[in-house]
Image (cartoon, grey):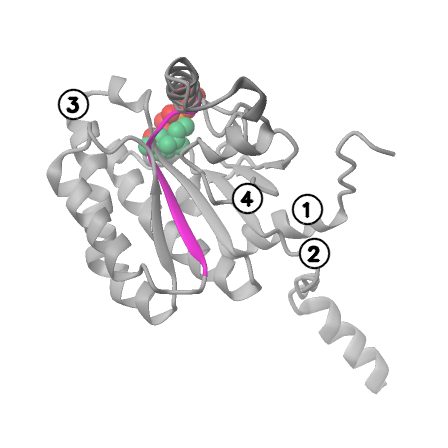
Amino acid sequence: MLQRLWARLGKSSPQPAQPLSSDNVPQHVAIIMDGNGRWAKNRGLPRMAGHHSGMKAVKHITMAADRIGVKYLTLYAFSTENWKRPKAEVDFLMKLPGQFLEIELNDLIANNVQVKMMGYKSDLPDYTLDAVEEAIKRTANNTGLILNFALNYGSRKEMLEAIKDMAAEVQQGQLTCEAIDEDYMSSRLLSSGIPDPDLLIRTSGELRLSNFMLWQLAYSEMWFTDVYWPEFTEEHFYEAIREYQRRARRYGGV
Ligand code: IPE
Ligand code: IPE
Ligand code: MG
């Protein structure tokens, strides 16, 4: 009788989430946060409402990554191609880092998070750059999760700039061709000092890289979901991590 009751209770209670193994947590997770505009459109809201909502997901996923022991979290926030969007949308997107950090910086500091930025600073408006640089400065000595914002980031530009700089150094006799190996190339990219992503997540159902970390993702595991970024929850994030933990990474070996 009691057993039947338990069985019934067990059936009607929500399925507990599968446990997350604490070993083999990816060291570096990179996310293409996509689908803000479509999320808003589906609700009859302006695209900006989607971008605004996406900020909450940034906070939740940052905290979740920190809790499970991810060391680096890279978030694609604005690409070098996103300047093509209408000016009003670009202006709105450029104000988001300041808004996000105004609300969240103290909490990030309290959680020992270190903020970094990966992208071209010179095209950013002062109010964007000032907010990001203040966050970088105030979290510089933190030793926890590294939250790396890819802001005005484009992988082809990143590689071209590195190649041009190296070519000039070779021409001036400061660098030899022989010294240019994979590690050296990595050290000349905007992600210098950060290991390659172990796991790439892209939301919103798009199955492409959109000029994101083309060099660094050579052997990353990829996980795609149809969920739009503003509705991407911790549980979706853990689902991606669990899937990552089931994969065998072979790097071309057997
Ligand atoms: C991602 O959402 C945010 C940025 C690219 C800045 P989108 O704005 O690309 O949303 P969709 O893809 O149009 O739905
Ligand atoms: C990639 O998303 C850039 C960011 C998430 C910041 P996009 O929405 O710009 O990519 P495409 O245009 O669909 O490839
Ligand atoms: Mg998009």
Out of 238 and 3, give the one closest to the viewer. Answer: 238
Dots 2 and 3: beta carbons under 8 Å?
Answer: no
Mark 2–mark 3 distance (CA, rounded to whole Å) = 43 Å
Q: Is residue 37 visible?
A: no
The x and y percentages for residue 30 are 50, 41
User: Is disc 2 placed on a helix, strand or loop?
Assistant: loop
From the viewer's perspective, tell me whether residue 221 is left or right of residue 36: right
User: What's under tag 2, amino acid-wise?
Assistant: Asn
Residue identified by numbered label 2: 24
- Image disc number at residue 87: 3
Residue identified by numbered label 4: 195
Residue 146 located within the stretch drawn in magenta: yes
User: What's under tag 4, amino acid-wise?
Assistant: Pro
- Image disc number at residue 162: none
Mark 2–mark 4 distance (CA, rounded to whole Å) = 15 Å
Labels 2 and 3: the sequence-earlier one? 2
Residue 49 located within the stretch drawn in magenta: no
What is the crowding at mark 1: few (fewer than 14 residues within 10 Å), some, or many (at least 20)? Answer: many
Labels 2 and 4: the sequence-earlier one? 2
Dots 1 and 2: beta carbons under 8 Å?
Answer: yes
Magenta-highlighted residues: 145-156
User: What's under tag 3, amino acid-wise?
Assistant: Lys
From the viewer's perspective, tell me whether residue 25 is left or right of residue 144: right
Out of 36 and 219, give the one closest to the viewer. Answer: 219
Please state which of the two labelled residues, at mark 3 or mark 4, is closer to the viewer. Answer: 4
Labels 1 and 3: the sequence-earlier one? 3
Labels 1 and 4: the sequence-earlier one? 4
Please state which of the two labelled residues, at mark 2 or mark 3, is closer to the viewer. Answer: 2
Q: Which image quadrant shows ligand 2?
A: top left
Labels 3 and 4: the sequence-earlier one? 3
Residue at 38% in and 50% down:
58
